[in-house]
Amino acid sequence: MTVNSVCEKLGLGVCNLADGEREVDGVYAGDLLSWVMGHAECSNVLVTIMSNINTLAVASLLDLSCVILSESVKPDKEFADTAKEKEINVFTSSLTTYELCAKLSEIL
């Protein structure tokens, strides 16, 4: 499934869409970025409430498909600008992390 398909099926808000055709190959949910670095895998979706640039550094390092900010977290301008600069797909959702993961499990 592609990032575009995930975005459409879940009705996500777009913060930055760098590559909508990027394949999604799993999901990881977490807010402790050092833990995410050791457990998430390439092409995973990261579901988190962490909207700081360190999240984008982890996404870039692990080559994640996208980051979804749950719980109505809104990224600030620095976050959005960095996502655009680093070409990282970032979305927002009002759903809880649990709800997003449950829905992702249904569609992937």
Image (cartoon, grey):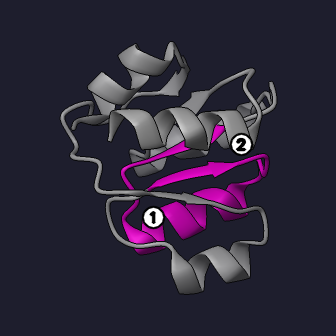
Would you say residue 49 sits in the magenta stretch?
Answer: yes
The residue sitting at 42% across, 35% down in the picture is 106
The amino acid pointed to by label 2 is Tyr
Query: Residue at the spot x=45%, y=74% of the render?
Result: 61
Q: Is residue 42 above or below residue 17?
A: below
Query: Which percent across, then down, holds residue 73?
Result: 81, 31
Along the line of sight, which residue is nearer the eye, 107 or 89? Answer: 107
Separation of residues labelled 1 and 2 (CA atoms): 24 Å
Task: Give the numbered dot on residue 60.
Answer: 1
Q: Position of residue 20 (x, y in %)?
A: 26, 30
The front one of 6 and 37 is 6
Residue 84 at x, y percent in the picture: 47, 37
Splitting the image into 4 quarters, where does residue 8 fall? top left
Q: Amino acid at mark 1?
A: Ser
Looking at the picture, does residue 77 appear above or below residue 40?
Answer: above
49 on left or right of 39: right
Q: Is residue 31 left or right of residue 19?
A: right
Question: Is residue 1 magenta-colored?
Answer: no
Residue in the foreground of this view, choosing between 38 and 77: 38
**Span highlighted in magenta in the image:** 45-69
Q: Residue, x 57% and y 86% (percent of image)?
A: 38
Q: Is residue 89 visible?
A: no
Q: Residues within 10 Å of mark 2 (few under 14, many from 20)?
A: few
Secondary element under disc 2, as helix, strand or loop, is helix
Q: Is residue 23 visible?
A: yes
Q: Give the SS element for disc 1.
A: helix
Identify which residue is drawn at 67% across, 24% down: 93
Q: Please, is residue 38 above or below residue 103 in the view?
A: below
| Residue 67: % across, % down | 54, 46
Outermost residue toward the bottom in this view: 38
Residue named by callout 2: 98
